[in-house]
Image (cartoon, rainbow, N blue to C red):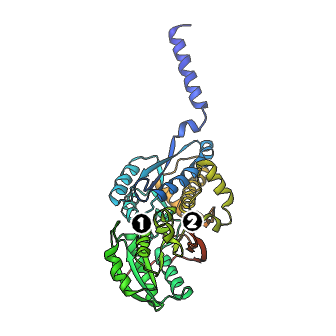
């Protein structure tokens, strides 16, 4: 056989092998990005969200392999800083293989970052962002699996005024989109319910709260409400107790972390927090999940870890269903965004998930918890399930 004939034969064989290769070898990679604070003061919650997302992806790798795709999770540390989140967002959209972003923890990071995702029509599914502005802009690609501050704030105020029968409150917030937003919603509802607002202060303090505590103590409120995150809220509570302030203490889901107990110590006993992410035992379907999480990571799952898992699975299931319905074709980002928004009655570990036309869950649960001892999580004392407020009509 001549050399030319041999070369032709090899070429024909190579072509034949290429056409007979399994389909998965030809379709490439689909990535899911997760953005959360993975370093710094808020890393505890950010890491929990990331691990929830990681578990969801690991469980789905084989299903995507059967469809012809490698499914990969790509974590990004937004450091709880808006400018870092935006820079990461630009890098994320530059990678055409990223079809879903799960994030963020901080609403103040999510809001500007989501503007970048919107321009690329990248599906965003938030496990934790409660600021009303996240979904009220009506972006077709922006969704969340948790509740909103214009419900969470009033839930806390209602519990304080109606369940605890408290008459006055001093409000402190951390000057962030999230902290000020939830504090403002708490204040508005507290006023409607007849509570006296004895003070309202914004602070970025992280060490010495004495300048705030001195006038607060003089006004002797029944309740101190803090709108913000545990790294400030735990220290504020500790210093309040050290300085003899006996008022009840309450905050939002920014206090929903084991770090609150580590920072506040015994002073957390008797305090309250509201959250859009209840503890694992508050959900009927979590027993198998919590066991699986602990086996994989060697630690107990935290509340937002479950929401990170569910947010990621929503994106995964939306893509999987779209690919199956379209003959194995790779979806575009816009097609994934539409599939996520249109997902129906998805069964997550935190309950059924389905979005309204703004990207809010049709129904969301809000929890009130109390620390009866300095052990995380607190004890659930009330659960309320509500629809998201309707979108405001544009004039």
Identify the image quadrant of residue 240: bottom left
Position of residue 141 measured from the top left corner of the image (x, y, whole percent):
46, 62
Which mark, by number, is residue 107?
A: 1
Label 1 sits on a secondary structure element that is: helix
Depth order, front residue of 382/323: 382
Q: Position of residue 45 (x, y in %)?
A: 48, 59
Residue 371 appears left or right of 109: right
Residue 310 against residue 387 in the figure, above or below: above
User: Which residue, as the protein is rendered here, is positioned at the far left?
Assistant: 211
Q: As rendered, which of 237 and 192 lies closer to the eye? A: 237
Q: Which residue is mark 2?
A: 375
Q: State the image coordinates of residue 360 (x, y, percent, origin top left).
A: 51, 70
Does residue 233 appear in the picture of this structure? Answer: yes
The first of marks 2 and 1 along the sequence is 1
Q: Secondary structure at mark 2?
A: loop
| Residue found at the very far bottom of the displayed protein | 194
């Amino acid at each position: 056989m001549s050399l030319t004939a041999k070369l032709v034969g090899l070429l024909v064989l190579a072509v034949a092998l290429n056409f007979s290769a399994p389909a998965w070898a030809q379709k490439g990679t689909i990535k899911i990005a997760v953005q959360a604070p993975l370093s710094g003061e808020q890393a505890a919650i950010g890491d929990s969200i990331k691990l929830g997302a990681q578990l969801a992806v690991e469980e789905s790798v084989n299903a995507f392999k059967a469809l012809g795709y490698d499914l990969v999770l790509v974590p990004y540390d937004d450091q709880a800083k808006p400018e870092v989140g935006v820079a990461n967002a630009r890098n994320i959209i530059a990678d055409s293989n990223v079809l879903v972003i799960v994030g963020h923890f901080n609403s103040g990071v999510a809001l500007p970052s989501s503007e970048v995702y919107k321009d690329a029509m990248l599906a965003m599914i938030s496990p934790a962002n409660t600021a009303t502005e996240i979904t009220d802009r009506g972006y077709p690609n922006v969704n969340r699996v948790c509740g909103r501050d214009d419900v969470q704030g009033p839930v806390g105020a209602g519990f304080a005024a109606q369940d605890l029968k408290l008459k006055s409150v001093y409000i402190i917030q951390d000057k962030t989109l999230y902290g000020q937003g939830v504090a403002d919603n708490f204040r508005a509802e507290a006023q409607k319910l007849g509570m006296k607002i004895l003070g309202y202060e914004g602070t970025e303090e992280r060490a010495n709260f004495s300048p705030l505590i001195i006038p607060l103590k003089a006004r002797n409120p029944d309740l101190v409400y803090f709108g913000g995150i545990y790294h400030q809220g735990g220290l504020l509570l500790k210093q309040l107790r050290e300085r003899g302030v006996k008022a009840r203490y309450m905050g939002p889901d920014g206090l929903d972390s084991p770090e609150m107990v580590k920072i506040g110590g015994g002073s957390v006993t008797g305090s309250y927090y509201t959250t859009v992410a209840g503890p694992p035992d508050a959900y009927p379907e979590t027993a198998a999940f919590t066991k699986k999480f602990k086996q994989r990571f060697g630690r107990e799952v935290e509340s937002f870890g479950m929401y990170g898992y569910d947010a990621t699975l929503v994106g995964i299931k939306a893509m999987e269903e779209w690919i199956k319905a379209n003959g194995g074709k790779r979806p575009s980002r816009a097609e994934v965004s539409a599939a996520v928004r249109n997902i129906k009655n998805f069964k997550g570990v935190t309950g059924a998930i389905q979005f309204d036309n703004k990207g809010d869950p049709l129904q969301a649960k809000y929890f009130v918890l109390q620390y009866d001892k300095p052990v995380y999580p607190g004890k659930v004392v009330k659960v309320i399930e509500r629809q998201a407020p309707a979108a405001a009509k544009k004039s």
